[in-house]
Amino acid sequence: MHRHTILATSVAASFLALVSITVLSCESPSGGERASASDSSGGDAGASSNSSAAAASGTKAVTKPDAPTKDAPRVQGKADANEITITPFLPSERCAVCHSHSPRAQALTTANGDDASPFGTWQATAMANSFRDPYWRAQMSREVELAPGNKAAIESLCLNCHAPIASHTARLTNTPPPSIETAVPDPLAQEGVSCTVCHRTTDEGLGTPASFNGRLAIRGDARIYGPFAEPATGPMRMHTGFTPTHGAHVSTSALCGACHTLYTQAEGATEPFLEQAVYLEWRNSEFSDENGVTSESRTCQACHMPDVGSMRIARNPGGVDFNIKVRDDVRSHTFVGGNAFLIDLLRENAKELGVTATSAALERVAAAARAMLAHDTARLSISNVVRTADRLEFDVRVENLTGHKLPSGYPARRVWLDVDVRAGRTKLWESGYTDASGRLKGIADEFAIPHYDRIERPDQVAVYEMVSGDVAGKTTTNLTRMATRSKDTRLLPRGWRADGPHANETAPVGTQGDDDFVAGSDTVTYSVPIPADAKDLLVVAGLYYQPIPPAWAATLESSKTEESRRFLTMYAKADHTPDSIATATVQVPAK
């Protein structure tokens, strides 16, 4: 058993590139100590515009409208400094002017005094670093290397979600889709999934196929959406040109589902391949609220954006509080998932990858991911223990506590059972142990592991994963060649139904005959040989997780691209200890 520290269309021409609006000037308060805002009826609010007052978090100082920074909305001439031009998107630091933490403000601060600001909690996440993700960059480069004639289509599809500002800017301005060459020098592409991607998205088409593959309905108007009713509009209009608007859709799973539902189309395939189905899996579960809220339903945001309590959600650019409403149920923008391995890679290679988050922030996000894996992801239990003179038989039950398959998302991810039987400190038998490189010991081909309902030998391992095949049925890790699922034993979410939504696309593959592989759980029976003279025994079961298994990384070794070489170098130096999700033990006394 491993030793672990457990810390998861087009747009009308008149609304294309730039939209000019007139914004109200706001008088700087005396001494910069406090600004007044009316938040009860959506009225305009006062805000400091002192260009020398920088946010305490280290963000840029706010400049006056008649002296814009390079990133700020542009002034339309000098005759009227209140007339500005709205760009479709802005860098996150513009949002941080009011939505970052300040030690002089109570806004965006938890009851423990921690930074709960959108900017502060987002910077070190996989969302903020989606474009810098070295594995994604390597995999995309490999896809292009294998099909250079499809370079434009491959990169356009990938950049929809990994550099969405670049993609949607091209759409809004009626210019060619971005390529990796145009995205790399683009500072807004480098921001990954940034503030003005999600918050500029309208509710048009969300939850329908029109929005899948990252096709968000972002328009060229000046509205920006948030979850709270009756927002104060003055400060946002003053410093960004956008008008804050209540949009309940930003709190729905359908918004997340736009990028977390991904289809690819292999050459020669008769239909698209569902590569990632997190949203569709959630729809066919008891977690879904799309047919009404229940005691069991939970949105993506409810699980992955932790509730940080009640607080003001913005502060004055000068670093002090606005006189605005305290909002309840404020959500952190940490976007906690299970991929702590990626966050560790970003931290360990921050300079080379251009990561701007601090090492401490990255450590915090990785710790949050491991805590989610350990506390909120799955449950193990051992039952039906029967001991004879020379064998020990028992059941291990795995319960999926998530609102989607486990694992879910990118098809490389796998979860498996590591089960051993001990006599004192001596291991008598083990199935599912990994070596220092993260490979399963005793497994010759990790892409050919069948589903097991009963395990009797150490080279039989219960692995919950998806294995894909190309149009000829040959196993492939290349996303653009995937056409079939030869294995999909990922644990189903609770409430999944064979007659539920998207059941044909999300049904398990390879579990036929295993009657206890059901919605929400699976049970594996172990039959283990034991010495006839064995005394008291201990059964130890663990559930472990890898987002990038070694066999997947190894498929990049034949690639000649710089991105593949860079990733493999980073991967080789990384700690490959798998992350623990759940454990269970039971003592078996001697007969």
Image: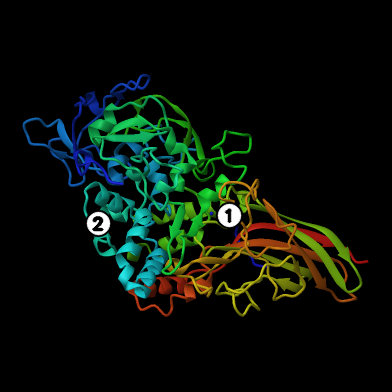
The residue at the point 44 percent across, 48 percent down is 209
Q: Amino acid at mark 2?
A: Asp
On screen, residue 166 versus residue 117, left or right, reads: left
Q: Position of residue 551 (x, y in %)?
A: 53, 74
Residue on which disc 2 sits: 186
* Helix, strand or loop under label 2: loop
Label annotation for residue 246:
none
Task: Please identify the residue farthest to the right as the structure is shown.
Answer: 591
User: Would you say 435 lies left or right of 412 here?
Assistant: right
Element on which disc 1 rests:
helix
Which quarter of the picture shows residue 150?
bottom left
At a point 28% along the width and 53% down the height, the residue shown is: 166
**Residue 588 spot, x, y in % from top left:** 85, 63
In the picture shown, does residue 385 fall above or below 148? Answer: above
User: Label 1 belongs to which residue?
Assistant: 504
Which quadrant: the C terminus? bottom right
Position above or below: 2 against 14: below
- In the image, 173 versus 62, the foreground residue is 173
Q: Quadrant of residue 522?
A: bottom right
Residue type for callout 1: Asn
